Amino acid sequence: MRKRKLRSISAALTVAAGSLAAGAVASQPAGALTAPVAITADSLPTWQTNGIVFAMAEANGTVFAGGTFSSVRPSGEAAGGGGEREAVNFAAFDAATGAPTGCSLSFTVGTGTATVRALAVSPDGTTLYAGGFFGAVNGTPVSSLAAIDTATCAVKSGFGVSVNATVRALAVSDDTVYLGGDFSSVGGQARSDFAAVTTSGDVTPFTADGDAPGRALALTPDGRNLVLGGDFDRVNGTASHALAVVDAGSGAVVKGYGSSFVPSTSVVKDIATDATGFYTGNEGTGGGVFDGRIAINLSDFNQRWRDTCLGATQSVEVYRSVLYSGSHAHDCSTMNEYPNQRRKHLLAQGVDNPAKLGWFPDTNDGLGEGIGPRAMSLASSGGTDYLWVGGEFTTVNGVAQQGLTRFASGPDTGVPTTPNVNVSSVTPGSVKVHIQTSLDLDDSSLTYRVYKNGGTTPVYTTTASSLPWVRPQLTWTDTDVTAGATYTYRVTASDGTNTTVKSPTQTVTAASVPDAYPSQVLADGATLYWRYNETANTFAADESPADDGGNHVGGPTRGVSPGALTGSASTAVTYNGTTQWSYSDAKHTRPSSYSIETWFRTTTTAGGKLVGFGDRTSEISATTDKHVYMTNAGRLIFGVRSGSNRTVTTSAAYNDGQWHHVVATQGSTGMRLYVDGALQASSFLITGGTDYTGYWHVGGDNLSGWTSRPTSNYFAGSIDETAIYPGVLSAAQIAQHYTLGKNG
């Protein structure tokens, strides 16, 4: 975890260990980045550690890293390679090159495992303070706290402070070093979890005794107050759980926070500051935890905003009005953002608004506790600003890289992903070009250009935003077409600096007459209509006006021919029944009435879900209903959660290898299940369902607890022409759809 330093009490931006004062920032944000993001997501070559980095700090273009490791090695080199150098729990790096400097310090202990847990630099940049659990630095006896001359990389022998347990947090002013940790004695005097010493090593009268470990410290910009974070429930006898503001001189509590502010199951792991506020990174265990971040105004020490994402936050850093954080955030559904899914380890949000900004570099969980990033530090060198990240990760942006990485204020070299494109022509006189918006890890707003028939000048240009968990579909309708003529289309995406190659060529013949089946589906009001005519990409294009496009997971077979519709060139998708499904990344509230329609073909005896509604996307859902699934025997079940699981089931089996048409409806007349145009099962009693927001799934999702649960959650077979309607289709409409599909 990174600990704080104060470069200048009057600075507009308080510097915390490894952060920059406003006057120290060297360069302007890269032009291609989506404001207010000012750090690219492009990881730079950086030397690595063979263990965990817990703390970072910066001085004069040098970045210091401390933790539990024994060596460093060049970027791209595997552990044990020929370029490895000894580095015992500490290393220093050139901020601009990512390579080690000549400063080599060894932090050791006679008994146990030595570790460096906190680093902070004096306001004048001349002294590095290190805290942790160690008994010597380069052989010089110390006691879990040391002062290092940054110019000579030598231990300052005059700073001899004895601490009887681990130091986990540091903050430094012109004349005082504040420390937090597990200790009960500092310099021979009783101090519980928090203490202060002079820069010459004398214990001060400052008293802010906690009843559990201190983990984070930050001085306010005016130097008058100190913010404490940790596990404690009381400070100087005053109830204040995990967070407190105390007088920097005396330690008296200025602002306490009750157990409901930071829940009793959560603690504060890090604190960052700027000119107007301070920001906490929080970690919880058990139920009802708080793992996110809180912004607190310096004017009154009250909350500005709160981020309730789950996934323990370990580090926070402010740069140019953006709060960057290291965590393993996996569920931001309470923020109306992404549902429980794969972890995202690096995030950004504005200091005035907790909504996530378009900055998504990533690491893995890595070693130790599987946390990922644990420390951050800002540095400036040669006109460029750098955000360094340390932790226990072993990959960065999908590439092997252990313990350390860094990002810069520019240039932005990351190219967006090439757009996925699908083209269709259902109505004479028009061709629809469907585009799945691209992903750029530091540019959420991208410009899309459509090229027609091999032309070099775009025929259509638009700008749209996307995020990793929601990549909205764009649709452009080309009306400059002739019936029966063939056209080709390609699309690029650009962040203003980096432009993708053109997408693979998509070819379409303009309709001469209305395509009967899809025309009727659209006329009947479908608000999701996946035809599965894509052949190679992961995009499930939506033909409906809602642009509710989807994503194929696990590589189901696309372009399967023939599809369900007789006499049509339309294709289908085939799922393997174990690891493949598709989902819409557009979040929906529970519909009061709806219809689910699809065609399917299978010989499976393991059952599986055809279409359904669930609360997650790229992971199996915890809550599911409004779904049609197949039993091992081939019967179809329509299930709704209304107080309990309610289902209706067909008497016949449909795993005969033929194409079948199924429609499930629910509304004021109850539940109805139709197969091949005829009603097969119904219940007029069940008119409502569980109220939750979710996502439409095709090909699989959780079936735990449902009637006649099949062997597999996932469907092995082909699916085609899936549609969702915001109302109940009539029996006549359903019969018409079946007839159109069978007769062409």
Image (spheres, rainbow, N blue to C red):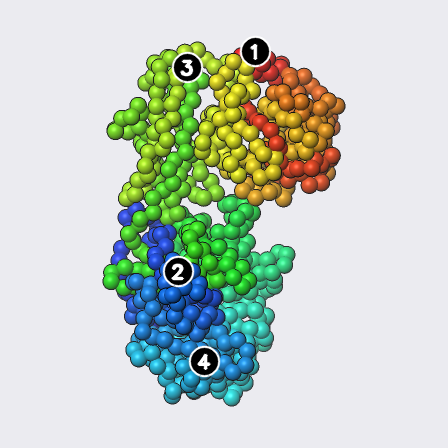
Q: Which element type, helix, strand or loop, lies under badge 4? A: strand
In front: label 1 or label 2: 2
Mark 2 vs mark 4: in front: 2
Q: Mark 1: give few (<14), some (14-19) or many (20+) Cα within 10 Å.
A: few
Q: Residue at x 68, y 33 (%)?
A: 606
> Which sits earlier in the primary sequence, circle 1 or circle 2?
2
In the image, is residue 202 above or below residue 444? Answer: below
What residue is drawn where x is 56% and y is 37%?
A: 580
Mark 1 to mark 2: distance in Å?
63 Å
715 left or right of 18 in image:
right
Q: Amino acid at mark 3?
A: Ala
Inspect the image, locate mark 1, and give the three-letter code of the amino acid beneath it: Asn
Mark with earlier residue (3, 2) = 2
Q: Secondary structure at mark 3?
A: loop
> Depth-wise, is mark 3 or mark 2 nearer the camera?
2
Residue under pointer 4: 145
Q: Earlier in the sequence, mark 1 or mark 3?
A: 3
Secondary element type, mark 1: helix
Q: Which residue is mark 1?
A: 743
Percent across and percent down for residue 588 are 55, 36
Do residues under tags 1 and 3 come within 8 Å of each other at their CB atoms? no
Q: Quadrant of residue 277?
A: bottom left
As drawn, the label of residue 77 is 2
Earlier-in-chain disc, 2 versus 4: 2
Give the residue pinned by disc 3: 511
- Label 4 amino acid? Leu
